[in-house]
Image (cartoon, helix red, strand yellow):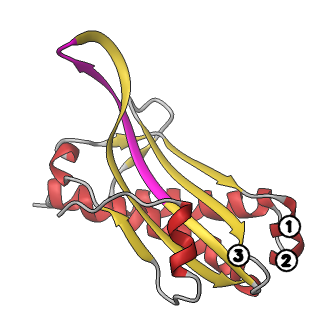
């Protein structure tokens, strides 16, 4: 099943929801035969988040990265900068008005070199993607960053294991 990818405009509709909303799932068949990934993490926010969330962007990036790479390795994937792809866990963190909430947009994307019949030159394309939106209390930001790293790895891992069942 494919869902429409959603973005920050959707967060307005979700304020106050306790559970994350899944934005899009991907076809797992593109992951057949994949053995290694170049895992990367991007965390974006502004200073207001640090002031209300109690951790810095560097601390958040470190927490997501540590959990993300650990969980990918537990699955049996080789995590290396020599992989012919980029597996990106992207986190956008925003203050959700004056409600004392922080809005999170978590995305996991696999980008690989692709060629198109109409443009035979090599391009980079997103071949697998998933995402979710959620809100958390501002005091839960540190724990949420660990959860984001785990979620990114689990979402990708579920697709990867579906395409590459263990024998």
Q: Position of residue 8 (x, y in %)?
A: 56, 62
C-alpha distance separating marks 2 and 3: 11 Å
Disc 3 target residue: 96
Vertical arrangement, residue 148 with respect to residue 135, above or below: above
Disc 2 target residue: 52
Is tag 2's residue or tag 3's residue first in the polypeptide sequence?
A: 2
Disc 1: CA contacts within 10 A as few (<14), some (14-19) or many (>=20): few
C-alpha distance separating marks 2 and 1: 6 Å
Magenta span has 111? yes
Q: Nearer the viewer, mark 2 or mark 3?
A: 3
The structure residue drawn at horizontal position 25% and vertical position 42%, both measured from the top left corner, is 34
Specify the label residue 78 is tagged with. Answer: none
Chain part drawn in magenta: 107-118
The structure residue drawn at horizontal position 47% and vertical position 86%, both measured from the top left corner, is 19
Disc 1 target residue: 48
Most frequent secondary structure within the magenta stretch: strand
The structure residue drawn at horizontal position 67% and vertical position 64%, both measured from the top left corner, is 93
Q: Are marks 2 and 1 in contact (CB under 8 Å)?
A: yes
């Amino acid at each position: 099943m494919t869902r429409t990818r959603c973005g920050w405009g959707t967060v307005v509709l979700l304020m106050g929801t306790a559970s994350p909303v899944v934005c899009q799932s991907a076809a797992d068949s593109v992951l057949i035969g994949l053995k290694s990934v170049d895992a990367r993490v991007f965390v974006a926010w502004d200073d207001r988040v640090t002031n209300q969330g109690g951790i810095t962007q560097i601390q958040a990036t470190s927490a997501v990265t540590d959990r993300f790479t650990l969980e990918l390795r537990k699955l049996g994937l080789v995590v290396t900068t020599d992989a012919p792809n980029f597996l990106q866990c992207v986190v956008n963190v925003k203050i959700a008005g004056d409600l004392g909430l922080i809005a999170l947009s978590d995305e996991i994307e696999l980008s690989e070199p692709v060629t198109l019949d109409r443009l035979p030159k090599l391009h980079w394309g997103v071949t697998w993607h998933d995402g979710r939106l959620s809100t958390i209390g501002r005091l839960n930001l540190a724990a949420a960053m660990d959860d984001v790293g785990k979620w990114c790895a689990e979402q990708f891992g579920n697709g990867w294991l579906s395409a590459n069942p263990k024998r």
